[in-house]
Image: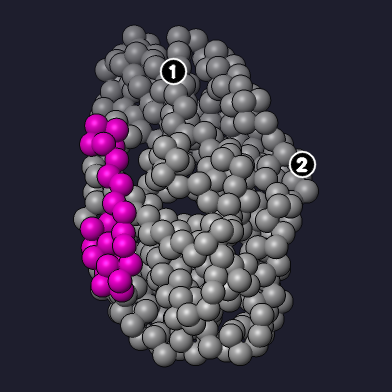
Amino acid sequence: MTLAAYTALDAWVDTHFDEQVQFLQQLVRVPTDTPPGNNAPHADRTAELLENFGLTVEKHPVPAQDVKDYGLESLTNLVVRRAYGPGPVIALNAHGDVVPPGEGWTHDPYGAEIVDGKLYGRASAVSKCDFATYTFALRALESLGLPLKGGVELVFTYDEEFGGELGPGWLLARQIINPDLLIAAGFSYQVITAHNGCLQMEVTVHGKMAHAAIPDTGIDALQGATAILSALYAQNTLYQSVSSQVKGITHPYLNVGRIEGGTNTNVVPGKVVLKLDRRMIPEENPAEVEAEVRRLIAGAAASVPGISVDIRRLLMADAWKPDNRNAALVQALQQHGEAVFGEPIPTSGTPLYTDVRLFGAADIPAAIYGAGPRTVLESNAKRADEHLVLEDLRRATKVVARTLLELLQ
């Protein structure tokens, strides 16, 4: 590939960058808080914007009852197909759903304000930004008018926060998409090639309500929950001695993220509900992990007389393991990333879990790369004042466009 072609790609991105930023602003201004997960309106707006670029958009609405059973309100997945001839099909996947904004914002979470070269708004960094990265990388690629092989698919989905089963999982299961390679939403300064798995569980601790003046007539569910919590946190300390061999991933860990229970201050609580998140390193067996956590909870509950527990799995997201079949894709992203950013772009694993595991389960080699900072923390993703440095968007778009050109010519 000649340097002139890459230079032309970069120039197209620069020329159309204001348009790209405006595209992203319009995406941020349509809320996709999940929950409640009323995300079909955003898909409709995205499709309209893509069609304004001359792209044909397939809308794939998930049946309403399936969405409701999943705990969401509406969901439409989008696919744009660009076929050039025989050769590999590369999918570009980003998700539009996001957690609610929460408190503490100094900018309107749906305002898409630009201040000091940063665009503020919920999902500006994770991952509506990569709707823009991938759309404009595709447009830049096609602007050259060069002969290409294979094809590109834009795949924009809306349930990553709930596990991806009605997004990529639904599309893959129905053979609506079946690409040869995948680039998925990520950040600009590293190429992610593996990630943790995640087990989420709901533990309902049952006791017996009683008046606080006669506590002996009741069974304190909170006391049972305390025993369970103590056992879980003691196990969490032991997890620190288990190390992953994947760079960027440390050890397993467990987090209790939500506790609900009791009816009033003068009532012995009869029920307490715990929701926990157990991150699994790629080397762990998910079935064994779940069995261990269940045994731990049951044993702790049994230590408190009268306490019983119900344990319900909420999510089982397998880890995405390293796959050498993505070598050409990873090397192209690294090579062009270094050329555009002026520094080496390393590979790494991440303790997050993503929809990419679903592509891995479908035997599709992948890499995670997109627009964003060096760490999730820097972007304020899932926190107040989430933002994207616009220069990262510009440069990541060039990297993806160059990578597509290299792999499809």
Question: Where does label 2 land, which residue?
Answer: 241
Judge whether residue 254 can be spotted in this image.
Answer: no
Q: Is residue 409 visible?
A: yes
**Element under disc 2:** loop
Does the stretch in magenta take in 119?
Answer: no
Relative to 339, say whether 212 is above or below. Answer: above
Q: In terms of secondary structure, where does tag 1 sit?
A: strand
In the displayed structure, 219 sits above or below 14; it is above
Range of residues picked out in magenta? 42-67
Give percent across and percent down for residue 45. 23, 63
Marked residue nearer the N-terminal end (1 or 2): 2
User: With respect to residue 260, does 332 lie above or below?
Assistant: below
Depth order, front residue of 90/302: 90
Q: Which mark is residue 136?
A: none
Dot 1 and dot 2 residues touching (CB under 8 Å): no
Q: CA distance from mark 1 to mark 2?
A: 29 Å
Q: Which residue is mark 1?
A: 310
